[in-house]
Amino acid sequence: MEPLAGRIFARRLREERVQAGLSQAALAGRVTEVLDQKLDASAITRIEKNERAVRLDEAVVIAELLDVSLVAMIRDRESVDEKIGELRRDLSAAQWRAIQAEEELQRAQDAIKGIQRLINDLEATQTH
């Protein structure tokens, strides 16, 4: 079963906040400024521990402040990594088919040229 969006958000919040080099207090302060509603560091701690649900307006602002899309904040990285792996395999297979198709096209074009040459040669012998 895939993790719930709230749990994913909690985990991704911590990952992205740490990557951005922000303390919980610093992020809480920025969220407070944008929303003009008090949010303290303990609220960020509880959200990260999935002990407190994040409100939608908080989630939107947090994602913006961390420069991450809200969708990315609720998407499980493992499932995204799996999907990327699948897509890379699909891409590789499609590229291989494209190479095969290009080679087949070249063979067909060569055959067309050969047939056209034979037709021209035969037509040339008829006119003499």
Image (cartoon, rainbow, N blue to C red):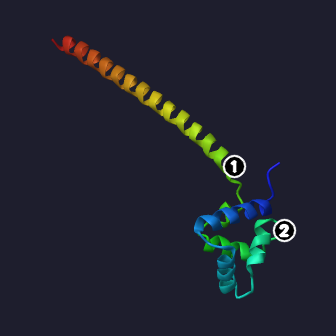
As drawn, 64 above or below 120: below
What amino acid type should be assigned to the residue bearing mark 2? Answer: Glu
Q: Residue 110 location, x and y as percent? A: 33, 22
Q: On the image, which quarter does residue 82 sit in? A: top right
> In the image shown, does 85 or 114 lie closer to the viewer?
85
Q: Residue 93 location, x and y as percent? A: 55, 33
**Direction from residue 42 to residue 17 in the image, left or right:** left
Residue that mark 2 sits on: 51
What amino acid type should be assigned to the residue bearing mark 1? Answer: Glu
**Direction from residue 108 to residue 12 in the image, left or right:** right
**In percent of the image, x 69 and y 79: which residue is there?**
28
**Direction from residue 65 to residue 4 in the image, left or right:** right
**In percent of the image, x 28 and y 17: which residue is there?**
119
The secondary structure type at the circle numbered 1 is helix
Q: Residue 74 location, x and y as percent? A: 72, 61
| Sequence order check, earlier mark of 1 and 2 | 2
Residue that mark 1 sits on: 78
